[in-house]
Amino acid sequence: MIIAVDGPAAAGKGTIARALAQHFGYHFLDTGSLYRMVGLSLLRDGKTPHDEAAAVENARSLDVSRFCDADLRTEAVGAAASIVAVNPQVRAALLDFQRVFAQQSPGAVLDGRDIGTVVCPDADAKLYITASPEVRARRRQAELGAASYGDVLADIRARDARDSTRATAPLVAAADAVVIDTSDMDIDQAVAAAIAVVGRAAG
Ligand code: CDP
């Protein structure tokens, strides 16, 4: 059983995907963390995320055990992730790991941007989680603490634009995805809606 959960930044997909994995007893992979690891490696090495050769090299030799979650979650690392994620060779280098992860028994939930379209186009259930940019900026601001609302909103809009317009694996709902707009939902309502969709697919 493979469940694909895609959508833009801070729409709630990470929380929903984790809750789905817990509810159904499946493995969980936050695929954005892979791109964040590549972005963070470059920043730590004093390189710009626009250094394509270094990004590809980093993606090919990624050691996932080297990174801790707190460092990965900053907005600077999110922005760097979305810059390296434009490069098709970076994406190709991370593809096998994601596909192997998805094959685990009894099932796996993967969240990202291209899970239902590219990584696992044959997933058993596909969810596309979205919300208005303003709602997403408020959530991300609360999650990050200090940052200003205006800065967070600008960053989210820039990341949406970059993720949606890139040539390789752009952010888009798969034709067979169920769209859940969480703008007016709290997290319990969003999780319940997602469980209902997956329950139908599993049954
Ligand atoms: O948590 P948030 O939604 O802010 O971001 P994330 O899921 O950690 O992803 C960070 C960046 O990685 C995104 O803006 C995308 O550019 C990229 N990404 C991607 O291209 N493909 C994926 N499957 C997951 C993330």
Image: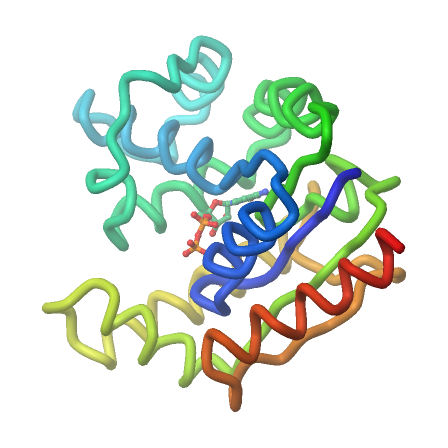
Count all numbered tags in the image, as a single digit: 0
Q: Which quadrant of the view contains residue 2? A: top right
Q: Which quadrant of the view contains residue 189? A: bottom right
**Residue at 57% of width from left, 75% of height from top?**
190
**Residue at 68% of width from left, 64% of height from top?**
195
For the residue pair 151 and 99, the one nearer the viewer reads as 99
**Residue at 62% of width from left, 72% of height from top?**
192
Q: Which image quadrant: the C terminus?
A: bottom right
Left-right relation of 38 to 190: left
Please identify the residue farthest to the top as the structure is shown: 61
Please identify the residue farthest to the left as the structure is shown: 146
**Spot occupied by residue 129 in the image (x, y as percentages of width and height):** 62, 67
**Spot occupied by residue 82 in the image (x, y as percentages of width and height):** 45, 46
Please identify the residue farthest to the bottom as the structure is shown: 184
Q: Which image quadrant: the N terminus?
A: top right
For the residue pair 13 and 161, the one nearer the viewer reads as 13
Left-right relation of 48 to 178: left
**190 versus 126 height, above or below:** below
**Spot occupied by residue 194 in the image (x, y as percentages of width and height):** 67, 66
**Residue at 35% of width from left, 33% of height from top?**
39
**Spot occupied by residue 75 in the image (x, y as percentages of width and height):** 27, 54
